[in-house]
Amino acid sequence: MQGIVFTYKNRRRRKKIRAVINKQGIKLFLGRWGGITLFAFMLAAGLTVGCICSGSLSSDTLRNLDFLFTTNMPERLSGGAWGAFCAGFASDFLFLLAAFLMGLSLWGAAALPFIAFFKGFGVGVSAGYLILTFGVKGILFYVSVLLPGIVISGMALIYELNAALGIFRTVCRALFGKAKVAFKEPAALYFRRGLKYLILTFIASVTDAVLWFGLAGLFF
């Protein structure tokens, strides 16, 4: 009987240890990847909604929002590689700047998921427009010309949003926490990361321009 009781207690202890390990693992995962997962999900949700809504948007609306959505093909093609670079970098820079500034605002954290969603919405509208208008040719154009730059800029935005969420937490702890929190070092790290993600966005725009110059003429 003693052996049976001892084995039962040992199993209970093992279950408790496993439960503690699982909780710690979840906390570690959420602390490191929770923000990135959230913003990646919001971007994907926006992409899905954008694809669905692309067919219901009027041509005037698409033309007016061309600085965010790749929809006005004739004008983009006439602008050449330089036009593609300027349009892509201006659009990505606006999203990156919005994320950077929202991280420094006390109410900005609430806007961060919507920035990711709207970025995904623009990507989805572009994809849906090309597919509906040009069919298979639009799909091939999107995958071979636009998608590489979109992936790079999208990752840069997701990590910038995650960094913005982190600096927001630091600001809140510094202002409302009981313990003193050093702000200079986290702020310097935040600015360095912002510069790194800006460089990645620039690389994405250069990639767009090169692919546009080399391959766009094969499709349109």
Image (cartoon, rainbow, N blue to C red):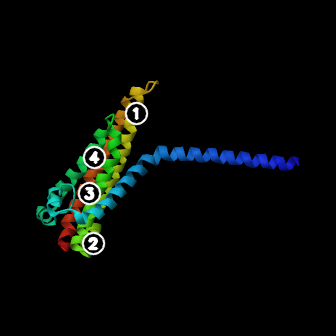
Query: On the picture, is 33 further left or further right than 214?
Result: right
**CA separation, marks 4 and 1?**
20 Å
Tell me the amino acid under the disc marked 3.
Answer: Gly
**In this figure, which residue is indicated by the disc labeled 1?**
170
**In this figure, which residue is indicated by the disc labeled 4?**
96
- Give the secondary structure at mark 1: helix
Tell me the amino acid under the disc marked 4.
Answer: Leu
Residue lying farthest to the right in this orientation:
1
Q: Say which of 73 and 200 sits in front.
A: 73
N-terminal label among 2 and 3: 3
In the rendered image, residue 91, in percent from the top left (x then y), is placed at 22, 52
In the rendered image, residue 37, in percent from the top left (x then y), is placed at 43, 51
N-terminal label among 4 and 1: 4
Residue positioned 27% across, 66% down in the render: 128
Residue lying farthest to the front in this orientation:
56
Residue positioned 35% across, 33% down in the render: 187
**In this figure, which residue is indicated by the disc labeled 2?**
140
- Give the secondary structure at mark 2: helix
**CA separation, marks 2 and 4?**
28 Å
Tally the marks.
4
N-terminal label among 1 and 2: 2
N-terminal label among 4 and 3: 4
**In this figure, which residue is indicated by the disc labeled 3?**
122
